[in-house]
Image (cartoon, grey):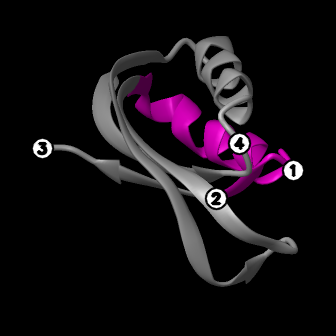
Amino acid sequence: MTNAYEFTIIVRNAAALVIAQKLLESFGGKKIDEKAWGKRILTYPIKKETSAEYYTWNIQLDKAKLAMFNTKLNYEDAILRHLILLKE
């Protein structure tokens, strides 16, 4: 069963979006919409970075594959933080 999610991602640079996109597609997901927040200065360093780019995607992904997608995102160095919320 495919659900709609809001996926917010904080990355070192825009090149990391390609990694996230390929990872999403490898799990059979699809990006519906993208909103770029731009580059922001971080309140505290994350992985020694003091600024990062913020993006929010609306995605569709199978509920059964969500946990593995989330786990794989944790292993990517270019992705500083991410949050996935179920849209209703």
Residue farthest left in this picture: 88
Of mark 2 and mark 3, the one earlier in the sequence is: 2
Q: Is residue 80 magenta?
A: yes
Q: Which residues are magenta?
A: 61-81
Q: Is residue 31 left or right of residue 75?
A: left
Left or right: residue 58 versus residue 15 is left
Check disc 2 and report its element: helix, strand or loop: strand
Q: Which residue is mark 2?
A: 52
Ranked by sequence position, the earlier of labels 3 and 4 is 4
Which label lies toward us, 3 or 4? 4
The answer to whether residue 48 is above or below residue 78 is below
Percent coordinates x, y for residue 63 in the rendering: 43, 33
Q: Which residue is mark 1?
A: 77
- Badge 3 is on which residue? 88
Disc nearer the start of the sequence (3/1): 1
CA–CA distance between discs 4 and 2? 7 Å
Residue type, numbered disc 4: Asn
For label 1, the SS is loop
Q: Amino acid at mark 3?
A: Glu
Give me the residue at 29% from left, 48% from top. 86
Vertical side of 12 occupied by 22: above or below: above
Badge 4 density bin: few <14, some 14–19, many ≥20, Cα 10 Å: some
Which residue is drawn at the image coordinates 65% and 34% (left, top)?
14
